[in-house]
Image (tube, coloured by chain):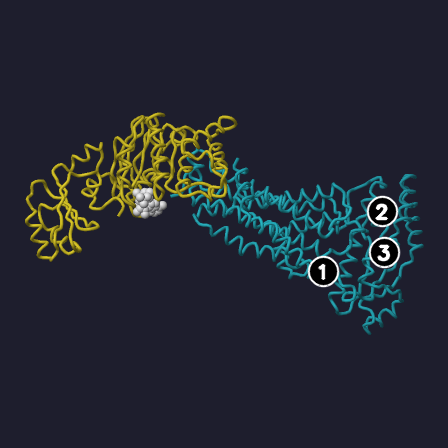
Amino acid sequence: MFVWKDLLLFWRDRKGLVLLLLMPFLMILILGFAMKGLMEGSPEALRMKAALVVEDDEASGIERFRTELRRRSLPEAAESALAASAEQASPYTLLKRMMENEEVGKFVEFVPMDAETAHTALESGEVKAVLTVPPEFTYKALVGMLLGEDGGAALRLTAGESPVHVDVLQGMLNGFVRSLNFRTALGEYGRPDAEPALAAGGVESMTDAKPMNSFLYFTLAMSVMFVLFVAGTTAAKAFAELRGRVFDRVLLADRHPLRFLGGKAGAAFCVAWLQLTLLFVLSHLAFGLFPGRPFSFWLGLSAINAVLSIGVGGFAALLTALNFRFRSSTASSMFSSIAVTVMALAGGSFTPASLLPDWVMQIGVWTPNGLAISLYTLWIQGFAAVDMAPSLLKLAAFAVLTLTAGIYLFPARRRVA
Amino acid sequence: MLETTELVKRFKGTYAVQGVSLYLDKGESVGLLGPNGAGKSTTISMISSLIKPTSGDVLLYGNSVVKNPAAIRKVLGVVPQEIALYEELTAYENLKFFGRIYKLKGKELELRIQEVLDMVGLRERQKELVRTYSGGMKRRINIAAALLHEPEIVIMDEPTVGIDPQSRNHILDTVRLLNREKGTTVLYTSHYMEEVEQLCSRMYIMDHGKVIASGSKQELKRILTGEDILHLQLDGPGAGMAGELRMLDAVLQVEETENGLKLIVAKQSRILSQVVQIAERHQVEILRVHVHTPSLEDVFLHLTGRTLRD
Ligand SMILES: Nc1ncnc2c1ncn2[C@@H]1O[C@H](COP(=O)(O)OP(=O)(O)OP(=O)(O)O)[C@@H](O)[C@H]1O
Ligand SMILES: [Mg+2]
C-alpha cells in the first residue's frame, strides 16, 4: 500500500516524470547525434592504413598442431574433433575475416608488407601502425584455444604517434585476441582431463566486437545517470511527507516506520526499473539499437535493470533516512545535484570510461552507474554470466549496503523531537 | 479514560509545556483553549504518542501511553493542525491510503470512506485532487482521514482555522454528530471561544505551557463574578489614557478596542468619575459607556492579559 501510494504520487508528478523520462531521452537524442561522427568514426576522420606483416605460416602451424595432437594419444573421437576445429577455426583465417569485416574496414585498411617495408612505411607515416602476426601464431593460438594451455594467441602491434587511431585498432585487436582465447572453452569438451581454464581476458564473441554506436552508448550512459535521480526524488518526496505531517499519520496508525522506508525503497525500485526499461525500449524503437535480438536478450537487459534498480532503491532508503534523521532535505538535494554528477562523471556517463584518467576509472568501477554500464556492455556484447558476476556482485553489495545503512539510520518509531 | 499527569516538554532549553494535567471522561467533549504558542499542539503530540514527554505521563485506562504507544494509537484519531494530506491525490485516494494503514480493506474500507465523506459533506467531490480544493474542503478531508478507523477518542487541533463559514459550520456539525450521536470522546483545540462554548461541556485554558484555568463554562465565568466589564466608546485614540487607567487599583485589565477601551474592573468600584477625569485630562471625550457581565473571552483576557487571537 505504501508502494501503491508512492507510485501514484510519481504518476501525478508530471514535472518529475518529464525529468525522469523525457529529459534523458532528449539527451540521448541530442548527444547521440552530436557524437555520432566522433564515435562511429566518420570513416574519413578515423580511417587509417596499417601494415600487415605475416611471419607465421598457417598451413604448417595447423600441421604442427595435428602432430601435437597425435603425440598426446587422445581418444580417437576427441582427436579428430580437435583436428577438425583447428581447420575450421584456424586463428589466422579468423583474423583475416575480422580484417575484412565491413565495420572494421571503416577504420583500418590492412596492407600486407614484409617487415622491412612496413618499418619504413611506419617511419614515413604512410601507415599508422604495423600489425605483426608472429611466427608460430597459428600453432600457439591453437594450443591455447583448443587445448586450453598457456601461451595462446598473441599479436604484435607497433605504432607511431597518433594515439586515437592506435587506440581504436588496439581495442579491436585486444577484443579479437580475447575472443580467440575464449574459444578454449569450446575445446574443453574434447579434452579428457578438462579443467575449467579460461584464458585471461574473458569471453567475447567475435561477431559483436564492433564499436559501440553513439546512440547505444548514450542510451546506457543517460539511463544509468537519470535513474539515480529517482533516489533523490523519492527521498525528497518522503521528506515532504515528514514536513507536511503525513508521516505522523503513519505513526499514529501504529505502522512501523520501517514499512514506510521499505515503501520508499520499493517505489524507487519500481520507478527506476520502469524508467530504465522504457528508456531502452524507446531508444530501441527510435534508433534501432538492438536489431533482431531475441527475447532472452531483452530479459537479460531487464534483469540488469532490476539489479541496478535495487541499488537505486537502496539509495532512496539511505537518503530518506538521512533526510529524516537531520530533518532537512539537504541529503537528497545534495545527492541529486552533486553526487549524481560526480558519479556520472566517474562512471563514464559523459565520456567513455576508457578515455578517463586511471584514478577516475578506479572510482568509476565502484559507482552503481559505472557498474551498470559495464554490465550492459558485457551483456550486449554477448559475454556470459560468469564474466558479469563480479560487477553484478558489486552492484548487489552496493544495494545491500545502502539499504542496511538506511535502515540503521532511519529514526525509529517516534517523531524525532 | 484518558489522563495526563504533569506533562512537561522541553525543546532545547525552552519549555513548550510545563506541567499539564488534564483528563477526558468517556463520551465527553472537552475544549483546549490558548493563544499561539501556548503549548496546545505540543500537549496533543504527547498525548497521541508522537513525541515523548520530557517528564510526566499519559494514561489510557490507567496504562502508560509513553511505555506502550500502541494502545492509544488504536483508539485515537488525531486531526492535525496542519493539513496532512497528499495534495496530488484525490480525496478518495487519500482516504483509501489512510484507511489501509489502519488495516481496513475491501468492502469495509469502501464503506468507511463513503461514511466519513458523508460526514464532512464531500462525497460528490471525492474524485478531485486535494490540491484543487478550497482551504475549508481540505480541512474537512483532514478530519475525515482521522475518523476512518472509528476511533473512540478524537483529538482535533484547531480544525477550523482560516476557513469559510460554510465549511466551519459543517465541521462543527461533524464534531457534534461524533460526540452526541456516536458517543466519541472529543478533545477540541481552538482559538475560537464561541466554538468551544458551543461544542464542549468542559474546557482547559492554556498559556505559556500551563493550564491556567479549567472547568465548565459556568465555573469559568464565576471567576469573573466579582468583576464588571466597562466598554468606553471614545471620540479619539484611547492609548494615551490606558496607562493611567491601569494605575487605578480597581482596574484589573485594560484593552484597546476598535472605537475605545475595554476595562475589567472590580464590582461596585465606583470608578466612573475617575475614568471621566482621566479622559478629560487626555482630552478624549467619552461618547458612550456600557457595562456588561463577562463572557468567556473576558475570562481569557482576565487570565492571560491577552485576547485569544493576539
Ligand atoms: N519541535 C520544536 N522545537 C522547538 N520548539 C518548539 C517545537 N515545537 C514547538 N515548539 C515551541 O513550543 C511552544 C509551544 O508550541 P505549540 O505548537 O505547542 O503551541 P500551540 O499552542 O499549538 O500554538 P498555536 O496556537 O500557534 O498552534 C512554542 O513556543 C513553539 O515555538
Ligand atoms: Mg498548535
Residue at the spot 73% in from the left edge and 66% down from the top edge: A163
Rendered-image quadrant of the N terminus of chain B:
top left
Q: Position of residue A311 (x, y in %)?
A: 59, 45
Q: Are marks 2 and 3 in contact (CB under 8 Å)?
A: no
Near mark 1 (Cα within 10 A), the count class, few <14, some 14-19 or many ≥20, is some
Q: Position of residue B304 (x, y in %)?
A: 21, 44
Q: Position of residue B115 (x, y in %)?
A: 44, 29
Name the residue tied to disc 3.
A95
Q: Which mark is residue A146?
A: 2
Amino acid identity at mark 3: Leu
Among the 4 quarters of the image, the one containing residue B145: top left
Q: Position of residue A142 (x, y in %)?
A: 86, 50
Q: Tell me the yellow chain.
A: B
Q: Is residue A210 left or right of residue A29?
A: right
Name the residue tied to disc 1.
A36
Amino acid identity at mark 1: Lys
Chain A shade: cyan
Question: Comparing marks 2 and 3, which lies closer to the viewer?
Answer: 3
- Please tell me which residue lies in front, A344 or A183: A344
Q: Earlier in the sequence, mark 2 or mark 3?
A: 3
Among the 4 quarters of the image, the one containing residue A30: bottom right
Do marks 2 and 3 share a chain? yes
Question: Comparing marks 3 and 1, which lies closer to the viewer?
Answer: 1
Q: State ligand 1's quadrant.
A: top left
